[in-house]
Image (cartoon, grey):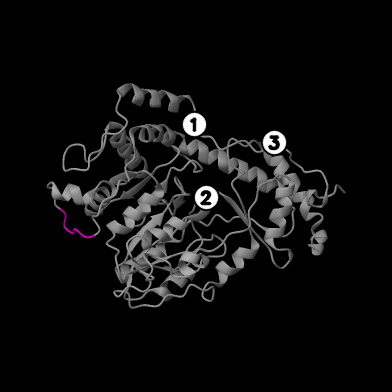
Amino acid sequence: MEELALFGGKPVREKPFPKHRTTGDEEKRIVMEVLDSGILSEFMGSNNEHFMGGPYVNAFEKKWSERFGVKHTVSVNSATSGLFAAVGAAGVGPGDEVIVPPWTMTATATAILSFNAVPVFCDIEEDTFCMDPVSVEKLITPRTRALMPVHIYGHPADMDPIMELASRYNLKVIEDAAQSPGGYYKGKLTGTIGHMGVFSFNCNKIIQCGEGGAVVTNDDELAKRLRLIRNHGEAVVATGMSVQDGSNIIGWNYRMNEIEAAIMMVQLDRLDHLLKERKDLVEYFEKGIRDVTGLILPVVKDGCTHTYYRYTMRLDRDSIKVPSATIAKALNAEGISFNADYIPLNLYPIYQKRMGYGSQGCPFTCAYYGGTVDYTMKNLPVTDQMTRTTLSSEVIRPPVTFVDVDQIIMAFQKIFKQIEKFDVI
């Protein structure tokens, strides 16, 4: 049997996988159209006809709203900005808590900190890595203002019980749908189920314009607040725009430019095709490793679809005792990029050391905050387990081909046929 690359053997693959690329001639054409217009942005932070941006921004927002069946789309310069704007629009502020899973990108939680509120981390579901509604309910207090489910890796969070909790406790729901555009939960598109949904157009996302994002909502007042936070809200209100609630309307510059908006108009037309390509690659991969013992492949729950933003599997601890980090190391040695080093957000220094704003520990020690928050792993047993049993990769996505996937399959088969060798590590 061929020696593992980790122990000096020849790697299965010796060249990099093709870089992620979703753009083509249509994007070139529309970018030149924008450049020929001479207007790269037409926003103004004032109460006038330019408050909503230029023609491509407005056209993209209209197109996204129609595709996703929502009343309002507010484009932004990143999903991070979109999360910040959504938390602000929800009225979150000092003394408030927002419940969020720790298995997500940092911005989901730092958006809460940005308004001097406190993130409270719930546990996740073992099969989807998404927010566990049972864990959420145990954490709700009189200080809880909002819930932030994350459709992590592209599988929807269980939104029905989350929305039921929100209704019962009068909470806002902000969906982080950065990784799941075009994904469905029981017939509804992810990002359109809560009060607001946030999408990402970062260079690594399923559709992208380099950077960029959007927030969607069906609520007129939330849409106005989002737009004010996006675009110098305090100046816009000063020049005549009225708001029902002036809190959190300390505006930033979260505006998308005309080139990004134009690219996204084309990218949106590619979404369904790109999702199908990902699904086809995943199905081919899973067919090739179905006989590999010890792997728990991603689930797709009834009524849901999966966008496979990242391909993430788990090890069956009953048959595989080797830590996932060791297997990831072996895969990387074979030229196949997989990760197993996820650190839950609650273990980041900003939460462990209560380092927020200034040197006084705000918002954790804010005079308006009367709660205590636990950032240990004590109440996160599933999250804790996942840190030792998860393998994740962005490799299985276009423009990767079935031939490329064959090499990924070969690497898994090679490693798992010699799994007993890892006892020496």
Please state if 62 lies on the left or on the right of 121 as rendered: left
Q: Earlier in the sequence, mark 2 or mark 1?
A: 1
Please state if 43 lies on the left or on the right of 266 as rendered: left
Q: Secondary structure at mark 2?
A: loop
Q: Earlier in the sequence, mark 3 or mark 1?
A: 1
Q: Secondary structure at mark 3?
A: helix
Relative to residue 176, is residue 208 depicted above or below?
Answer: above
Q: Secondary structure at mark 1?
A: loop
Our reading of the magenta stretch's main secondary structure is loop
Three-letter code, disc 1: Thr
Three-letter code, disc 2: His
Q: Residues within 10 Å of mark 3 (few under 14, many from 20)?
A: few
| Front in this rendered view, residue 129 or 93 | 93
Q: Residues within 10 Å of mark 1 (few under 14, many from 20)?
A: some
Which of discs 3 and 1 lies nearer the camera? The answer is 1
The residue singled out by tag 1 in the image is 23
Q: Which mark is residue 306?
A: 2
How much space separates mark 3 and mark 1, taking CA atoms? Answer: 22 Å
Image quarter of residue 416: bottom right
Relative to residue 4, is residue 18 depicted above or below?
Answer: above
